[in-house]
Image: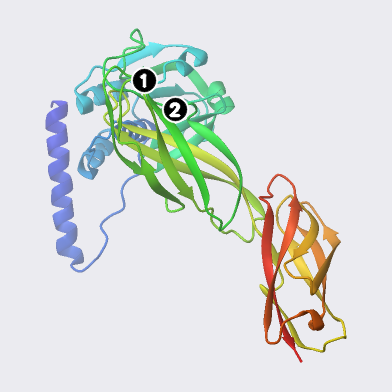
Amino acid sequence: MSRLSRRIAAALACLLAAIASVAVLGEAEAGPARRPLTCGLSALVGVSRILALDLGETEVDVLASEYPATDPMTLLEVRQELQVLTGRRPYVIEATYEELLMLDVPVVAHLVGRGSCADCGDGGHTVALDRLGGDWAIAVDEDGTHLIPGRELRNLYAGHAITLADPTCPSPAGPRLAVDTCVADIGMSIAGRVLPHSIVVRNEGRDPLHLDRVATGDAVRVVGFSTELAPGQSGLIRLAICPEHHLDRPSEVQTYFIHVYSDDCVRPCSSLALRSIVVQPVRPESPVIYFPRVTPGEPAERTVAIECRRPVELLDAIPSHEALSAEIRQTRADSFITEYEMRLSVRADALTPGVSELPVALRLKGAASHGADLIARVRVWPD
């Protein structure tokens, strides 16, 4: 039986099984869970996403029935299915890791050992790589987009790969989307605070490049992007990043994937990654500090605890009014959290009649400081 006949038969079997399950289950909301995909098939799904091709669930199920976990897909079988999927001739290359880095095209690489792939055996597996950099590589599979450390990839790479671009033609005709780095470190950011960031993109092809859309995750909003770039022209993708709150983790590295869809002749869906060390903001024990019934001529004092969950040093407090003074004293410090006490004094005779609201800011020192942080508002009720 030919491969096409097997696929048709498998598709019919899947359809009949779905009809039977609906008849038996009646009002059941979910069908049977998809069988786990082998590494080779997962890499094939990843390539289809990089090429912005529609590899439907039925086709994936058919391929999963042809290449079960007991008989996983080899590199040559990935090449064969890739040719059927794209209608183009894939190239099997033998190259060193350094030569692979210089290709700047999506590849399906053959790896040996487990590495980051816990479900694969020691005999080797394949992975679809969208972009390769010095420290990181962007991999795509049926679960989405991931980062693989460059050192790990170098150690696991077996010397063979598949590419749809001719390795002897470094500059194919057509538009080409290029960036300075596929994985950019955007520094330290503060949870809950919007961080603007722009990505510079270039057209290194021979024809005009059209950007159709830019897809991101929930923590990133696309502000705008250049829609057309002439050959040699650069443009911007403007983003607004809002790091998520994780109060149980004082600081962590968060990765944001950006997917740029264009008419790039080699990589229609180009994936980029932004990495940031996200730290928690400086927090007082209360956002509003109350001084009720302050008598003119008599000093009123309060001590406020401040929790600092990022690697900065609090230098001093900056009151916004001459009636308010503040002193900072460190009380405890460990690897992640530093605690301070802020002693506030207020003179009611220097205030205007009525309830007064006096903002207090902190002057910070450290890599994560962005000027003075407004941490609290002091409300004073004169007697």
Residue that mark 1 sits on: 232
Q: At x 24% / y 66%, what residue is drawn?
A: 28
The mark nearer the N terminus, 1 or 2, is 2
Q: Decide which of 199, 74 is in the foreground and name it.
A: 199
**Is 263 or 328 nearer to us in this picture?**
328
Viewport quadrant of the N terminus: top left
Q: Mark yes or no: residue 216 visible.
A: no
* Mark in front: 1 vs 2: 1
- Residue 9 at x, y percent in the picture: 13, 38
Tag 1 secondary structure: loop
Position of residue 219 measured from the top left corner of the image (x, y, whole percent): 46, 52
Residue 102 percent across, percent down from the top left:
46, 15
Q: Callout 1, which amino acid?
A: Gly
Near mark 2 (Cα within 10 A), the count class, few <14, some 14-19 or many ≥20, is some
Q: Quadrant of residue 162?
A: top left
| In the depicted structure, whether residue 281 falls above or below residue 348 | above
**Up/down of 247 relative to 83, above or below:** below
Residue that badge 2 annotates: 179
Residue sitting at the far top: 168
Label 2 sits on a secondary structure element that is loop
In this picture, residue 142 sits left or right of residue 317: left
Q: Which mark is residue 368?
A: none
> Which amino acid is tagged 2?
Val
Give how far apart the Cα atoms at labels 1 and 2 are. 12 Å
Residue at position x 78%, y 51% in the image: 335
Position above or below: 86 against 253: above
* Residue positioned 43% across, 42% down in the render: 238
Corner quadrant of residue 284: bottom right
Residue 72 drawn above or below residue 277: above
Whether residue 162 is visible to the viewer of this picture, yes or no, is: yes
